[in-house]
Image (cartoon, helix red, strand yellow):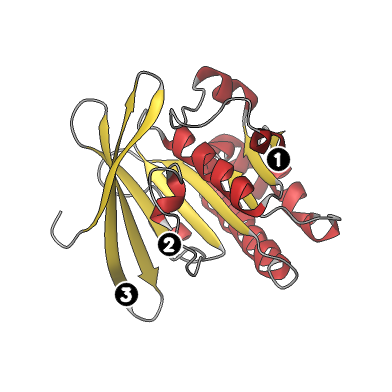
Amino acid sequence: MIESFFDGNQVEILETHVDPITLLSGPPCCGKTSLLFQFAYNCASQSNANVVFMCNRSRLQSKRPYLSQSIDPSSHVFKLIQMKYVEDDEEIKKYFAAFHLHDKIPTAVVVDDFGDFFDDRTCQERYANPRGRDLAMVRTLALCYNAITHAIKKSPCKLLLSDTHLGNSTRLLYIYKRWISSIFTVKGDGPGSFILRNNNYSRSCGLEKTRIAKYSIALKYLVFEGITDDNEQ
């Protein structure tokens, strides 16, 4: 699935098994939103079906995504990407609680900066618990998982979330791993260059095969540099 984050004209996008929920985690300013939007574009282009891109409007306006230079800005595919602006985790829960009521299930739902929708103080007050934020994330992830696994019984659908982490480990990894076995992480590889790593966490077999993709953000474009199997990096 790592190919799905890049332009299909530059890399062959393979049809393989896809987990119902995938997480993309990386440090600030590493192009996560660009990778997510390229993923949404590829899903819409391949399926000719709608994709929902869920995000905070002000954050998106302050960090607009960059796509591959080969993509036509006037492409009809952009009309298949439905922007849904939300302010907090309650709005995300409302959307997925009614997911089964949609006349047409989107082929993919993408949520940018998922973890940032959970305000620490608000969650603590809501649950009267110092770990309220953790509880809110657990309940929302459980709802998302149930909505997506129910939807795919009728038609193909996948959910991609992103989160920001500082340092080398994914923020709240112990929570995400309960529902997500496919986790992509980003780290810097020099000025403007990054490595995207695919970590598959199987609940029965532990950490499985790892692949990496190298990319950069240059001249307001997402530039794909290659994919390799990785055993040491």
Which residue is nearer to you in this view: 161 or 91?
161
Residue with the mark numbered 2: 182
Query: Callout 1: helix, strand or loop?
Result: helix
Relative to 188, is 107 above or below? below
Residue 147 in picture, x, y percent from top left: 70, 62
Kind of residue sitting beneath label 1: Leu
Q: Amino acid at mark 3?
A: Gly
Q: Earlier in the sequence, mark 2 or mark 3?
A: 2
What's the mark number on residue 206? 3
Cα separation, mark 1 vs mark 3, equals 37 Å
Provide residue 71's location: percent of width, then percent of height. Answer: 51, 32
Task: Provide the secondary structure element on which disc 3 rests.
Answer: strand
Task: Name the side, left or right, on which 108 lies relative to 206.
Answer: right
219 is higher (above) or lower (below) than 13? above
CA distance for labels 2 and 3: 12 Å
Side of 116 where 209 appears, left or right: left
Q: Nearer the viewer, mark 2 or mark 1?
A: 1
Looking at the picture, which amino acid does disc 2 mark?
Ser
Which type of secondary structure does the marked residue at label 2 adopt? strand
Residue drawn at (71%, 52%) of the image: 106
Q: Is residue 37 left or right of residue 186?
A: right
From this viewpoint, is residue 113 visible? no
Q: Residues within 10 Å of mark 3 (few under 14, many from 20)?
A: few
Measure the C-alpha gap from mark 2 to mark 1: 25 Å
The label on residue 80 is 1
Q: Earlier in the sequence, mark 1 or mark 3?
A: 1
